[in-house]
Image (cartoon, grey):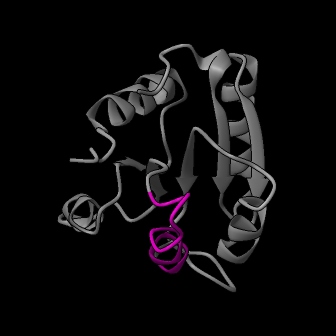
Amino acid sequence: MISDNIRDWVVLIVDDEPDNVGVAQKVLSFNGAIVHIARNGLEGLAALEQVAPTFILLDLSMPEMDGWEMFARLRTIPNMASIPVIALTAHAMAGDREKVINAGFNGYIAKPFRINSFLEDIHKCLSEFSPPTNE
């Protein structure tokens, strides 16, 4: 179960657009979250060797390794496979949200996101996330 208290969050933002990263980082940090940044999927996977995030905000279109590839690789790493991953993406055409959710992401937030509802959008994605049970 993920805490509703933002001060308990450790967030990994993986995005190559400095403005998007800056705004997301400021909103989360201001509210008490610990935020780590990676600029592409390769850096994101490397960051996971040092950081155990509560969840990941993952852009889908990046150089070197895109979010789709990082997500696919992440889901094959046993101790990382259950980390919630929210797509934070400019892919906002009809059907894009469904494509992301059907791929197994735990949420979808379109860019540009609204600052005044950003945390609420994250909470909504996380509340819909239910970790796998060991039955």
Q: Residue furthest right?
A: 50
Q: Residue at x 64, y 20 (%)?
A: 8
Task: Give above or below for 71 relative to 84.
Answer: below
Which span of residues is magenta-colored? 69-81
Of the 4 image quadrants, the one containing the N terminus is top left
Q: Is residue 16 visible?
A: yes
Task: Give above or below for 33 relative to 53.
Answer: above
Q: Residue at x 55, y 74 (%)?
A: 70
Judged left or right of residue 25, residue 92 is left
Q: Is residue 20 visible?
A: no
Toward the viewer: 130 or 22?
A: 130
Residue 27: x %, y % from top left? 67, 26
Residue 13: x %, y % from top left? 66, 50
Toward the viewer: 127 or 92?
A: 127
Residue 108: x %, y % from top left? 36, 50
Residue 84: x %, y % from top left? 45, 47
Is residue 71 rendered magenta in the image?
A: yes
